[in-house]
Image: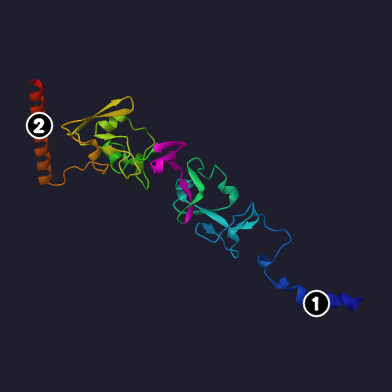
Amino acid sequence: MKKTFLFSIVSFLLFGGANAFTPWWDQDTICRINPSKCYPDMTGNGYFYNKYDSLSWDDTSKCWGKKYICPQALKDTTATERVAMDRTDISDSSLINTTDFDTTILNEDCFGVRKSRNGGAEVSVGGTFKKVWCDGVLGELGINSADITALENGEIVTQDITCGALAAKGYIGKTPTENKCYGKYYDEMEYRIECDASEPTLFVLNGADPDSVSSDPTKQPPQTESDAEALFTKMIQNASQRRTAMQNNGD
């Protein structure tokens, strides 16, 4: 009996017990990983998966692998680098800005994309969708640069931009052609903008075609002396045309 037992122990160690000498992290366990609690694929970008690094172990889900969360999606506004987090922390609204960011969408090498609509021309800010203004529009309106947040499609600000403020600078709150942002500019010498509440009305002067407006959302100031002279010449010509039109209407 003793010989049989001894033989069984030796056989287990030599043959059936090969895993006895395998590191604990590579051994098969009786308790299998629950797929509903673990990420289905942790081999691509945005995942921290290393069975030889204890920091990669998600203790709450009992799985290897964590997700990298983008710094802009974190409640910690001082964060500048992506952070590897387990599922419990990712679902914690005190750590993640779940109101404005979707941590299920990959953003290059981390998860966390700002929620948007209208093709990206509007994004979530504090749970409310705000318009993304084309680069330069907010600056022309005199908005403090410290209050402006730059995004891929343009700029956002927490305060609401009124129709009147835009009209005073020759803009309306519409999206220019092929631009995922708001702030369409009309030449003030050819168009007049009036606001009825928050809705702009465009008055066409001198027979200008509103559909032919450049897709460039911002107006550019004169860069050289010759540009300034050309601008003044254009102003004089427009004024002359308007006087002629008024005189003809008077006849």
Q: Quadrant of the N terminus?
A: bottom right
Quadrant in the rendering for residue 53: bottom right
Circle 2: residue type: Gln
Indicate which label's residue lies in the foreground, 1 or 2: 2
Q: Main secondary structure of the magenta part?
A: strand
- The kind of secondary structure element at disc 1 is helix
Count of numbered tags:
2
Residue 236 locus on image (x, y percent)? 9, 34
Q: Is residue 127 magenta?
A: yes
Q: Residues within 10 Å of mark 2 (few under 14, many from 20)?
A: few
* Foreground residue among 86 and 178: 178
Circle 1: residue type: Ser
In the image, is 45 to the left or to the right of 151? right
Indicate which disc residue 11 carries: 1
- The kind of secondary structure element at disc 2 is helix
- Measured along the vertical axis of the image, is residue 29 above or below residue 71? below
Residue 247 locus on image (x, y percent)? 7, 24
Label 1 to label 2: alpha-carbon separation: 106 Å
Q: Is residue 194 magenta?
A: no
* Residue at left offset 54%, top offset 54%: 67
* Foreground residue among 20 and 46: 46
Q: Quadrant of the C terminus?
A: top left
- Measured along the vertical axis of the image, is residue 225 above or below residue 174? below
Quadrant in the rendering for residue 202: top left
Task: Give the residues drawn in magenta, as a range.
Answer: 109-130
Quadrant in the rendering for residue 203: top left
Q: Disc 1 or 2, which lies upstream in sequence? A: 1
* Residue 75 appears in the figure: no
* Residue at left offset 60%, top offset 64%: 51
Mark 2 sits on what residue? 241
